[in-house]
Image (spheres, coloured by chain):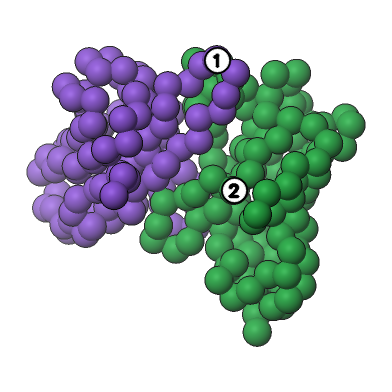
């Protein structure tokens, strides 16, 4: 089954701790993305990566870090510097944007992070 | 990126056709219009995309007038399972940064029995 997976589904952490959210895809997609969604709100882009070993900040990158060492993996670390980390985190992937085709984003099931 | 405006919420009944309109007055020449659907506690999924006139697939139709300053997503004969949030996104999807589309607040559709 091809798809994109995120783990864990629910995550709790104590204030001041760093936590890493996993995102894996076996769709052979070049591009991967992390979004944050707060209750009743739309998605906001945190980081994105269009190719291995390269990534760019999105609209709300402060307090987050990412790595892209492998094509299929794009973990997100929520650091203690993130002031309000409780949210629903969504990972997505797509083929590399470019050329004359739209590359729709495929989303994972999400991780709900709660800071206690 | 073009700013979009859509109704916050809509109600409908099973079997009705639902039309959700999105305004994008400052749409650029190279911008496409894309709609995603999101169920609670799930990631969004792509529904339909268009540039002008009308696009239809097995799920929905997208109507875009000649001036492209608005678009309408049409869902035929909705069922309870169509209850979701629908996002309208506008952007230049053909360029390298084209996937950097902005998800606004969306329209929360409630389908009643």
**Callout 2: chain:** B
Q: Which residue is mark 2?
A: B47
Q: Quadrant of residue A115?
A: bottom left
Residue position for label 1: A99
Residue A35 pos. (x, y %): 38, 39
Rate crowding at label 2 as few (under 14), some (14 to 19) or many (20 or more) other CA atoms within 10 Å: many
Chain at tag 1: A
Instruction: Determine the colour of chain B.
Output: green
- Determine which of the numbered discs, if any, sits on residue A29 in the image: none
The answer to whether one can see residue B47 in this image is yes
Measured as percent of width and height from the top left, residue A47 is found at: 34, 28
Residue depicted at 70% across the width and 65% down the height:
B10
Q: Quadrant of residue B35?
A: top right
Classify the position of the C terminus of chain A by image quarter: bottom left
Q: Residue at x 15, y 40 (%)?
A: A20
Observer-nearest residue: A99 or B99?
A99
Q: Secondary structure at mark 2?
A: strand
Q: In the rendered view, would you say B35 is above or below B38?
A: above
| Visual hue assigned to chain A | purple
Q: Which residue sits at x=73%, y=21%?
A: B28
Q: Is residue B51 left or right of residue A57?
A: right
Residue, x 49% and y 49% (percent of image)? B45
User: Contact (CB < 8 A) between labels 2 and 1?
Assistant: no
Q: In the picture shown, does residue B78 fall above or below A46?
A: below
In the rendered image, the vertical position of residue B67 relative to residue A15, given as above or below:
above
Residue found at the very far front of the displayed protein: A1
Q: How many marks?
A: 2
Of helix, strand and loop, which one carries label 1? loop
User: Visible in this render: residue A86?
Assistant: no
């Amino acid at each position: 089954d091809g798809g994109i997976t995120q783990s864990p589904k629910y995550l709790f952490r104590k204030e001041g701790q760093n936590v890493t959210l996993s995102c894996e895809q076996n769709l052979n997609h070049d591009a991967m993305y992390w979004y944050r969604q707060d209750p009743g709100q739309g998605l906001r882009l945190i980081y994105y990566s269009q190719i291995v070993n390269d990534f760019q900040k999105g609209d709300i990158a402060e307090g987050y870090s990412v790595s892209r060492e492998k094509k299929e993996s794009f973990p997100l670390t929520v650091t203690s510097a993130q002031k309000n980390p409780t949210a629903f985190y969504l990972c997505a992937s797509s083929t590399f944007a470019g050329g004359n085709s739209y590359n729709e984003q495929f989303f994972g099931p999400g991780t709900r992070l709660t800071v206690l | 990126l073009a700013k979009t405006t859509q109704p916050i919420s809509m109600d409908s009944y099973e079997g009705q056709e639902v039309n959700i309109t999105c305004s994008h007055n400052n749409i650029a020449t190279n911008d496409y219009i894309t709609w995603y659907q999101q169920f609670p506690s799930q990631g969004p999924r792509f529904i339909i995309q268009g540039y002008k006139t009308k696009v239809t697939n097995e799920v929905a139709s997208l109507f875009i007038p000649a001036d492209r300053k608005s678009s309408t997503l049409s869902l035929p004969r909705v069922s309870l399972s169509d209850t979701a949030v629908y996002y309208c996104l506008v952007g230049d999807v053909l360029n390298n940064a084209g996937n950097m589309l902005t998800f606004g607040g969306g329209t929360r559709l409630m389908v009643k029995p």
